[in-house]
Amino acid sequence: MLVFPVRGDQMGNAARVVFHRLGLAGNIKTASAGSIGSMMDKIKQDSGFRSSVDAMRKVFIRVEREERGVRIIEDCLAGKLPIPSVMTRSPRIVAALDALVTRTQS
């Protein structure tokens, strides 16, 4: 994976990509076809990147099978967990949550 963060949380996400050896981060302002090609070559030649990506893929598959995200959302909708405050600030999200709660209670 090659990432070229520009703003906001992209910087932190790029740092995580590099930290977990899932890929490399570059600077979009100074990147060239040559430098991007070199980054791609480095990733292809270093088997550590492939190993890290495979390990992360296994984690994602396991977590997806556990359906933790689904259970958290269902518990929020059922009133067993509080709905995060960031979600209650948007009228559009509040309306969507209300519609889901109504559907789950029917």
Image (cartoon, rainbow, N blue to C red):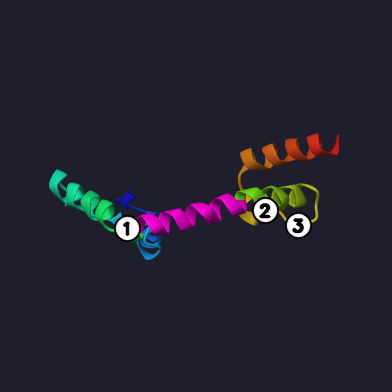
At label 2, the amino acid type is: Arg
Residue labelled with disc 3: 81
At label 1, the amino acid type is: Ser
Pick the front one: 5 or 25: 25
Give the magenta part as a residue range.
Answer: 49-63
Residue labelled with disc 2: 68
N-terminal of the pair, mark 2 or mark 1, is: 1
Residue labelled with disc 1: 47
Q: Nearer the viewer, mark 3 or mark 1?
A: 1
Residue 18 in the image: above or below residue 4 = below
| Disc 2 element | helix
At label 3, the amino acid type is: Leu
Q: Position of residue 67 (x, y in %)?
A: 67, 49
Please tell me which residue is depicted at 60% across the width and 53% down the height of the picture.
62
Residue 22 quadrant: bottom left
Q: Residues within 10 Å of mark 2 (few under 14, many from 20)?
A: few
Please tell me which residue is depicted at 80% across the width and 48% down the height of the picture.
78
Pick the front one: 17 or 81: 17
Which secondary structure dominates the residues rendered in magenta? helix
CB atoms at circles 3 and 2 under 8 Å apart?
no
Q: Position of residue 106 (x, y in %)?
A: 86, 34
Q: Position of residue 82 (x, y in %)?
A: 73, 57
Pick the front one: 88 or 40: 40
Q: Residue furthest bottom?
A: 19
Q: Does residue 57 show up magenta in the picture? A: yes
CB atoms at circles 3 and 1 under 8 Å apart?
no
Please tell me which residue is depicted at 69% across the width and 38% down the height of the picture.
95
Q: Nearer the viewer, mark 3 or mark 2?
A: 2
N-terminal of the pair, mark 3 or mark 2, is: 2
| Disc 1 element | helix
Q: Position of residue 86 (x, y in %)?
A: 60, 53
